[in-house]
Image: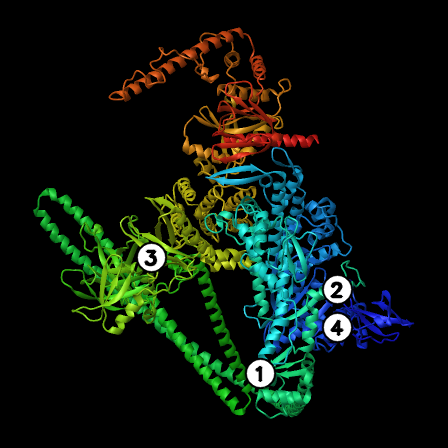
Amino acid sequence: MGILEVQPGGWVWVKRDFALPANVISSANGVLTLKIDGDEEIKVNSNDLTTDNYSIMHPSCLQGHQDMASLSDLHEGSLLHNLKVRYFANEIYTYIGSILVAVNPYKPISGLYSNENLEKYSKQFIGEDKPHIYAIANEAFRNIWKSGESQCVLISGESGAGKTESTKMILDFLSAMGAKNNNGEKSLVSSRILSSSPILEAFGNAKTVYNHNSSRFGKFIQLAFAEDGNIVGGNISHYLLEKNRTVGQNPSERNYHIFYQLLLGVTEPLKSKLCLDDPKNFRYVSAAGAVRDPNCEDKNDFKEVMSSFEVMGLSNQVVEEILTILAGILHLGNVTFHMDGGAQISDKDAVEKAAQFLSVNTEQLIESLTHNKREMRGEVFLSPLNEDQALASRDSITMAVYSHLFDWIIQRINSRIKAPKTPFSSIGVLDIFGFENFAVNRFEQFNINFANEKLQQFFNKHIFSLEQLEYNQEGIPWSDIDWTDNAGCIDLVERKMGVFSVIDEESRFPKGTDKSMLEKLHNANAKNPFYIKPKITGPDFGIKHYAGDVIYNTVGFLEKNRGSFRDDLITLLKDSKSDFMYDLFEGVKLSTERGGRGKPKAATVASSFKESLSSLMTTLSSSNPFFIRCVKPNARKQANDFQNQLMINQLRYSGMMQTVVIRRSGYPVRRLYADFCSRYQPLLASIYTKVPKDKVSLYLTKNASEKEWQAGKTKVFMKETLENNLEQQRVRILGSAAIMIQKHWRGAIARMRYRKRLQDIVKVQSVVRAHLYRKFYLQTKSAALVVQKYVRGHIARQVVAEMWAEKCARLEAELEAQRKALEERRAEMERLRKEAQEQEAEQLRRELEEEEQARKKEEEERKRIEEERMREAMKRMEELEKKRREEEAKRQEEERIRLEEERLEREREEKRAEDERAAAILAAEAEEAEQMGLADDEVALDEAEQEMFRHLQDLDSHLGQEDGEHEQEIDEWWDLEPEDEDVYANMTGQEGFDTISEAGDTPEIDVESSLPVHAGYLKVREASMVSRWKQKYCILQGDSMLIFNAKQDYLKSGWLRKKGGGKGTLSRRNWLPRFFILQNTTLSYFEFEGGEVKGQINLRHAIKILENPLDKNKNNYIGLVTPERTYEIIAEDENEHRSWLRILKEVHNTPDELLHTMKEEMNPRNAVASIDLIELESCNRVEDKAENHVFCVITNDRLHYFAAEDSDEMFRWIDLLSPQEINVKQNALHSGYMTLVKSKIVRRKVFVSLTEKGLEMSKRRDGPIEGKISLHSLCVVTNPEEVGGEFCFYIHVRKRSYYFAVKTMAEANQWADDISEVITSKEQFQTRTERLIVELRNLQSDEIDSVYKSNAILRYTKAAIQTPILALPYGPCSATNSTPLQEQAVSIYKSFLNYEGATSPVEFIETQLGHLFDSPLLIDELYCQLIKQTSWVRDVDNPQNLRYWMFLLCVLITHTPSRKILRYLKFHIQRNTSKYSGTEMYKFAVYAEGLLTSGVKQREYVPSREELKKLLFLKDMPASISCYGGWNCKIAVTPTLTARVAVARLLSGMGLNPRHNKYALFEKLDNTYKVIEDRTLISDVLAKFERKTPGEGWCIFFKLFGIVEFNIAKCDPLELVFLYEFVCDQIRRGLFPDDKVSLTELAGLRCQYLYGDYTPDKSYTVSDIYKVTLPEVKYPVSSRKNTGTLRGLGTLGKGTIRKLKDLYTDTEKEDELLMQEEIEKAKNTINDYWKTKSGLSKGAAQQELLKVTTRWLAFGYGIFDVLIIDNRFRETELWLAVGRNDIAIYPRQKSLPLEVHTYDSIISFGAPQVNVFKITIEGHAPLEMNTPEFLDIARLMKTYIGIMVKMKKERR
């Protein structure tokens, strides 16, 4: 211990908790006066100034150091003092090597982030200028190319230390650097990344007690860079948004900024639309008392957020939807509750506004807030919530909506800044929540602090652990530094039975509580040094974090960790009318959809956060990190305020001191020797050794200090200062070299330019001279041409005149000669004609004379006949003569035409010869001119014109051809006829599920599924008494081995039915099966396969190929029309018909040279045998005496022997057919033995292993795999069911189903659950149509048209589809319909073709709707098919299109599609209404749009035929509502009319006040009534009873449901009638006390009312008045034979059963007689009283009856028969009376109650199970009763409670 000597003015360090600087002010009498840290003055004796308490300060410490690693005095005090000095000098950044320490100034510093500073730091290395965050960002940017790996910047610190602002500064710098490499302009991606900051701050930041702009979530921003340095994309990952801040904040804190910005910055019109006003009026933003913050400019920030949305590319509609949801959250926060028989809404206005802006149904929202909905056995039960539970429901909706909105915003930002798949490199910036320690720390603080622990561990590992490890490995001398390792704290949280493990374990227990969780934490971790168990028992535990001890309150831990959200709340939000709201919750699954068949196995919040944090650490570990440690100088957020203790705490737990030590004594920069030589080669040019290590050592020994570097085994270690010097030298040398290269290059360029310019000048001179000479020549030539022109013209005109004169003379002579020759010929022909006529006449005369002589010899009676014959002969002669004249005239005319044509031809020949002579003359002249050299220009011009003309002709021809092709394409696109169905089938088939591969993890398009794996000839041994081998052609294809008689070297083959030839009468019936083979262009047919050819058809000679049969009854017809005959063929089914038709047309139209390119088709139908590989057990080589190379294939039912040609081929087949060997199933998710059931007889026990890919089956546990079942998202596993003592379930996969059986239900459930989980985990498969539907959302109208044009699957076609449009799950349609869903979907579409021409569309629609009710999974598929068939139709008003629209309307009113298809349907309808206004189809589209707007509901029954008929004509269906007295009310029933709306219409039409009493509609069947729920559709009720109860006994009845107010004097007459009938109905049903006097009185008054005064002839039925019961009479024993006992029956032997039966029959008869006597007695009593009321009017009788009934206490109550379950009452069969203010329990038929309870005393009520109703009453045991009317009781009680609450509110 020494004494320090210090003079006044000197500085010392005062050693306390940490060293503080002290200035020696004065020294007197051995006493020194010290001023510590500029504040405190102390006096110290000079002898006490020892080294134990004081130390001398180095003078350099008085000034702030830019790098604390260079401090002379190195201890905590010097670090603190250095930061403080720099802080008050506005130098807020300080280095520790390459680590940056940033102190929050809490004020703006002028010029700190100016563009000049940004430009300056972009050109400098780190350390060359003052410390700055830009220097760190620039170093990370340069390191992309320097190190060739990704970079990351980790910004850490407490809340309020300035992490968010530091992140923005780094992003600004990197964006500016990207713009610098992009010609100074920021890219759109870069602008969007910067614009994301205001959005994320608004939605994710809030004011806390520590920070005005605290990030309440963590984010990791990755920027992707191209090789040129430009930003090409990015991605934002977020962590643990503080959801509960939206519903509550700590005192003096605020909600998220966006709420205040919305309230203060929104425009007035939108503010009025969203019903927003002062923030103080909204509980969610004002409850903590900090509505306004002077540090936040909410109005300006809101404008910045709106502009950022615009930069992000969000439309105004989307932005308005976001603001609307925020407004809905604010209004939802104002919803309050009070207890009144359960939680009730206090302010309905707030809940209505919340429902409006969240686009949900108000009644459903109220129900979800105040009741818990459960579903049991198909019934839905509602249980009332208390006030706290209702508030929790409200807040859970708020938190869910806001968190999903936040996720959606970040997802949309990522989609806008999406980077390419393989960017050059990236820089990540981590801004995560700082360490937090509040007065009360909850689950959120626990996760936040754990994240900071992980980041601190990463910092420690990078700075300390890895540093020391690498020094030791490289052999660098090093002394270990003590540093705080937080691995123990992290192990406490992460290890087994650690904090996370216990929290998750308790969260998965349904009965787990925060208390049980805390007990497990204490038991498991009490001895851990990092765990704090409070000494006082309470809900707390603590953890010793690196930043200090934190005590956590466990209240709410489990609830927040579960993240539970009730199914009814999820359903409420998913049913929102807003598509935007639906998008937020589209991926949220109900508990019954998670984890397989009802088990909620979703990850907890803690486990999800842990996984995301682990992923983040992995990303950081793969990048080169830079650290920025943000610290805050004070906790008051004040400028120029530096708190030493707060700062030293931050420096300590962040390990700053150790960091300074290791940076000071260590070598942070290290490079491999080869890398050093490569980068600094310009500096090493003078060193000639080839060994890299020696070269580096020589250079550094010569040019650097020994303290600046060390040589390791593989690397050289350097200080950062040395690296900066080396980089600067490298830049200087490379710069000088570049300048030298530039100098020589510029000289060479200048010389080249000079030579080029000189050549250009000479060339210009030569051209000018040539131009002058040419100009003189052209002038001379022009003058000569003028002279030649006139001379040549004169000569030519003379020659032409002479030639023309000669030609005219010659033509005249020729014409004259022709005329003469023609006249001579005509004369000759006339002479010949006359001679011929004379000869014929002479001949006729001779014949007549001979005939006349012969006739004279005949009898007289024949003269008349001969005369007639003569006349006929004369007539025939005249006709012949006429015919000869006509033929002669025709020949003359033809001769004249021929001569004229010959003449014209001669003239043309002469003219052509004349032109040739003229051309020869001109050619001679041109030749003469050419010789003179004067005609060059004219000839060149003519040739150019001719060439241009030819080019234009070619261009016109080409364009015309292209136009024709386009027109042909458009015609083909419009007219897609059935013959083009193969084209359409190819388009649709690519998306079919038959092409989904089962071999992969996910369903993909299996292009090669139809290609054979292996094929070849094998000998097959036949199963017979004698072993015979026959050669067969075998193909291994897919999951089958096909065996053919021979190789199919033809295009197609198969069996068809051919119409026989011949001319017999039975030929039309001669359809015989023939085997057809198509080879090249010849189609041959045989009587049997391999038989003799029966005939051949050459398709090249076919004229036409028909597909429409002459006989309409023949389906699948093909006709081949040849010149000789027509061949008629019929295929077996539609698929074969389509396949044959396609191949025949292709061959008919394909040229011969392209036939070889057609693919050979292997038709499985032609196979003589096949082996299913799934049944294959093994494949082995066997020995056979007859054949060599034999192998045997063993299946379940038989052995198959094959022989190959050689051993290689045999082993090839064995390898392909042998099942793959498998190891023990270590990676199996579940494994065990199950029974694979193929039929009742065929069963096989197999060992099944469930993996992530599917199921693997083997004979034994360690046996080879013998079968696989691939699972993907379309597979289905059914619920297990008991069958014959076993528990079985189906697995439906592609093309087949597997049936498994196990012994216990628990095992079956476990298998089904695990398989379902694997299926659920697979990526959802999407067809091309589904992808196109999503694509259509974001396209413009012209782009939409092109999509429709290029995708036939979206538009109308006549061809049938081959696969469903949507991805349908595998398996049957339903339990009653075993048809697979895919086949059913295709058959529905095929039925459309019949529907287009159906005579009765109603029956077709009714049938199809019935299928939908049986198979609800086909609803979306049917909608897509109907949308397809009504899209892109040429004539929208054609009957077929209108029929499809009719069908669409019918489906729309019965089934609601899923949200995706509903959006597609809306788009389709809106598109048609906008394009086809004024058409007939437009009316249907508008009607459909109206249905969607009004909100159609899911029907329970197929609509009635009457409704369908009316709907087809767009009319409403009339319906009749019955009332008392036989009245009927007619109402128009629309598809959306509910019972509530119908009641409101009836009340309005009748003038009844709905406030006085409650009315309802009832289903009346005979004398029973069943209330119709308010939400029930009237059309559904009508459809139900049209099918179930046809006849006259049913109707919809309108009557009173509950009495609210009753005053006979003030009642409206009509209202009094309903009240009167309500009372009479209760009396008739026996729900009135059995007082004989009162009942007789009431019955007499009822008769007087109905029938008037009594007369004997008036008859009535007593049961129509009131219920008559047998009196309780005790009969003597003798009156009935052994009543109630077996005495008198003797021993139970022969005849005992007969005696019992007789006794029972006698008792029944006696009861009937007694009942008749009682009815007769009652009727006499009623008549006697009726007589006394004679003269009483109808109204008076009504009034008097009501006065009598009001004497009963339960008047106006709803009375229900119940059976009390417990024994609290002596009787169990009681009445439950439900009234306006209370409920009461009455003995049946009694007038006094047993118990009465007001609604205020009722805690809850509901149905715990079917036919059971339970009422929980405060201070009493629960009332539990059996009753089938439990739903009516609950509804009536709910109605009365609602009325009571409403009236109380009105009174207040």
Q: Position of residue 65 (x, y in %)?
A: 77, 74
Q: Secondary structure at mark 4?
A: helix
Please state, as top left, top right, bottom left or bottom right, where the N terminus lies in the image: bottom right
Nearer the observer: mark 4 or 3; the answer is 4
Residue 516, placed above or below residue 678: above
Which numbered marker is on residue 822?
none
The residue under label 3 is 1138
SS for dot 2? helix
Q: Residues within 10 Å of mark 2 (few under 14, many from 20)?
A: some
Q: Earlier in the sequence, mark 4 or mark 3?
A: 4
Callout 4, which amino acid?
Asn
Up the image or down, 1484 lies above or below 1031; here it is above
Name the mark on residue 713.
1
Residue 777 position (above or below residue 1058): below
Q: Residues within 10 Å of mark 4 (few under 14, many from 20)?
A: few
The residue under label 4 is 117
**Is residue 320 rendered to the left or right of residue 40?**
left
**Cα–Cα gap, marks 4 and 3:** 76 Å
Q: Position of residue 1237 (x, y in %)?
A: 31, 51
